[in-house]
């Protein structure tokens, strides 16, 4: 066995890409900070029951599991940081008012999300707790758009949906948990033949309403079409009204609608959204409202937020020119040491030439040299 081989869909990040990712991480976290979002760093693994609380069956299937040798209990390596942040808000911070939290760390998936996806995304996101109004959803979607802009990624569209529409239809239709799960899967994949078969035993007008959901996507006209096709129901009416208000507040963004987008259905409780760009095959960012997750940790709080893979963003954004380094001779000269420290204080990368490696320093990105001329140490171009 070749000892340098890594598991499938797991890969190293080499210097040039790592530098792009780190620059982007710093820029995004700085942007979150000036919007009032405080950084938290949850643990890599937790006891499984805590890690999966409120996250639904889909997260259970994505989570690596192992046995803790100290306690004998089953632990999981996080596949999503959002439930951990909800636990921190509900159980540790315990604030009465609004809390804004952000994070950036690796997660691990038992299986890749797609054929080309890594199993170790670098998840970055922001969450807002304590406000149930549409203003919170508006804020986090605007922050998402700002984060994409920082990454040099232009969103071609931001789809808005609402899990309350499907949930209300399922309740009114009286479907059991198994059929609800099958309907959810068919809607998520837009499997129209499968959906027609599943709704055979459901009475009208709910049968037609469920069949109409995959067609309820597009601009504001699609939302009005949805209102005409669905039965009169207070919960559905409130959900559609929330989407109208949200779209009106976000007129500056490429907002559209998709009422069959139910990702995270098992833990989302209201508005959901997904951002797309032309250069990426799937959603580049996902988010939504998940008001019920904190209740499992002893304190239910309104909550909304988004997350995305920083590695994807770094690859999609325009690559900036990597700044070169300055090669300095290996010498204990006091003036040289002072010149090196002054350059580093200005943000320059200064590499000291260890003896015996002449001719190889271009590999480290050195495009200038520090030389002594006219009694002073000066930076000159060339290797």
Image (spheres, rainbow, N blue to C red):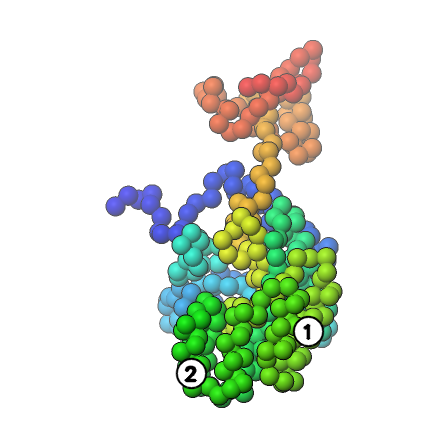
Rendering quarter of residue 88: bottom right
Q: Quadrant of the C terminus?
A: top right
Q: Residue 75: give x, y in percent of width and height.
A: 42, 68
Which circle marks residue 242 in the picture? 1
Judging depth in this view, the residue of 328 and 181 nearest the camera is 181
Determine whether the residue tagged by mark 1 lies in a helix, strand or loop.
helix
Q: Which mark is residue 200?
A: 2
Q: Nearer the viewer, residue 336 or 66?
A: 66
Q: Secondary structure at mark 2?
A: loop
Q: Which mark is residue 356?
A: none
Q: Residues within 10 Å of mark 1 (few under 14, many from 20)?
A: some
Most extreme residue toward the top is 374
For image coordinates 62% across by 53% down, the residue present is 155
Mark 1 to mark 2 CA distance (whole Å): 31 Å
Residue 241 visible to the viewer: yes
Q: Please give left or right for residue 135 compared with residue 189 in the image.
A: right
Residue drawn where x is 72% and y is 60% of the image: 251
Front position in the image: 125 or 114 = 114
Residue shown at the point (50%, 76%) measured from the top left: 211
Query: Is 195 left or right of 159, judged from the image as shown?
Result: left
């Amino acid at each position: 066995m070749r000892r340098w081989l890594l598991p499938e869909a797991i890969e190293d990040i080499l210097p040039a890409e790592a530098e792009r990712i780190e620059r982007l991480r710093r820029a995004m976290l700085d942007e979150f900070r000036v919007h009032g979002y405080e950084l938290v760093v949850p643990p890599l693994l937790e006891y499984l029951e805590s890690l999966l609380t409120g996250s639904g069956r889909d997260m259970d299937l994505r989570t690596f599991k192992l046995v803790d040798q100290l306690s004998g209990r089953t632990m999981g390596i996080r596949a999503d940081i959002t439930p951990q942040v909800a636990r921190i808000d509900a159980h540790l911070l315990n604030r009465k008012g609004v809390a804004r939290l952000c994070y950036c760390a690796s997660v691990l998936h038992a299986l890749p999300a797609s054929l080309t996806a890594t199993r170790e995304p670098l998840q970055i996101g922001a969450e807002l707790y304590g406000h149930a109004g549409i203003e919170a959803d508006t804020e986090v979607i605007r922050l998402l758009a700002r984060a994409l802009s920082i990454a040099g990624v232009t969103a071609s569209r931001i789809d808005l949906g609402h899990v309350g529409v499907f949930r209300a239809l399922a309740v009114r239709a009286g479907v059991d948990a198994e059929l609800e799960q099958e309907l959810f899967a068919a809607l998520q994949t837009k499997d129209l033949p499968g959906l027609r078969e599943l709704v055979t035993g459901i009475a009208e007008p709910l049968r037609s309403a469920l069949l109409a959901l995959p067609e309820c996507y597009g601009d504001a006209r699609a939302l009005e079409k949805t209102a005409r096709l669905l039965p009169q129901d207070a919960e559905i009416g409130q959900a559609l009204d929330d989407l109208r208000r949200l779209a009106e507040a976000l007129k500056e963004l490429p907002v559209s609608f998709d009422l069959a987008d139910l990702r995270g259905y098992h833990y989302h409780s209201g508005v959901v959204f997904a951002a797309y760009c032309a250069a990426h095959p799937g959603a580049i960012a996902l988010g939504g409202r998940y008001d019920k997750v904190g209740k499992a940790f002893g304190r239910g709080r309104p909550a909304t937020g988004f997350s995305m893979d920083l590695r994807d963003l770094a690859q999609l954004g325009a690559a900036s020119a990597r700044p070169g380094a300055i090669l300095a001779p290996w010498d204990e000269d006091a003036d040289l040491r002072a010149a090196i420290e002054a350059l580093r204080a200005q943000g320059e990368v200064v590499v000291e030439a260890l003896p015996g490696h002449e001719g190889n320093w271009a590999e480290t990105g050195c495009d200038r040299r520090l030389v002594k001329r006219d009694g002073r140490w000066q930076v000159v171009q060339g290797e």
